Image (cartoon, helix red, strand yellow):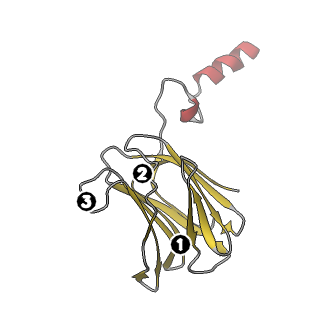
Amino acid sequence: MAGTLLLLLLLLPPLLPACQPNRSFSSITDIVVNNMPLKVGHTLTVTGFPTEGAERFMMNIDYGADIAFHMSVWLNTTSVYKDLVVYNTKQGGSWKKEIHTGLFPFKQTGLFKFTVTLTRDEFLVILSDGSEVHFPNRLGASEYNDFSFEKGVRIRSFEIN
C-alpha cells in the first residue's frame, strides 16, 4: 500500500510549478483583484518579472473609479520615459501631478520584489534594492479593496499582511 501511494504521488503533477528545479514556472499576467482589503498598517508584497520585450508594466490600487496609487515602471525603452518609475493618482477622471524619484532597481529580464505599506498619510514603497519611496495617500482612505497589474508583467506572487 505504501509503495502504491508513493508511486501515485510521483505521478501526480506538481501543485506549485515554481518549486520544481529545472522547470520554468507559470506566472499570471494582467490581474485584477477585487475585495482584498489593504488597510492602514497592512503591506502588499509583490514579486514578478517584466514580460519579454515589455516597455512598461503597471500596478494600480483602486478606490471605486479612482486610482489611489498608480505605479508605472518604464523599462529600457525609446519613449520619453526610460528606466523610470512614475507614481500618480487619478481622481475624478483626472491625473494628478506625477512623482519621479530617480530610483530604478528593475531589469528587463530580472525578478523583482517590492512592498507597498499603507499608512494614513502615504503609501510607503520599498523597492528591490531597499530604497524607499514615500507617495502621499492623496485620497485619504484607510482601506483600499481593489488592485491590478497590467501590461508587460508576469506576477509570481502577491500577498497582503
Report the residue marked by disc 1. 62
Of residues 99 and 2, the one drawn nearer to the viewer in this rendering: 99
- Rendered view: 22 above or below 113: above
- Rendered view: 22 above or below 93: above
Extreme residue toward the top, this view: 3
Report the residue marked by disc 2. 153
Residue 96 in the figure: left or right of residue 146? left
Of residues 54 and 14, the one drawn nearer to the viewer in this rendering: 54
The amino acid type, in three-letter code, at marker 2 is Val
Of residues 64 and 3, the one drawn nearer to the viewer in this rendering: 64
Circle 3 packing at 10 Å, graded few (<14), some (14-19), many (20+), is few
Check disc 1 and report its element: helix, strand or loop: strand
Looking at the rendered image, the quarter that the C terminus falls into is bottom right
N-terminal of the pair, mark 1 or mark 2, is 1
Give coordinates of residue 11: x percent, y percent: 58, 22
Residue at 41%, 83% (x, y): give it: 94
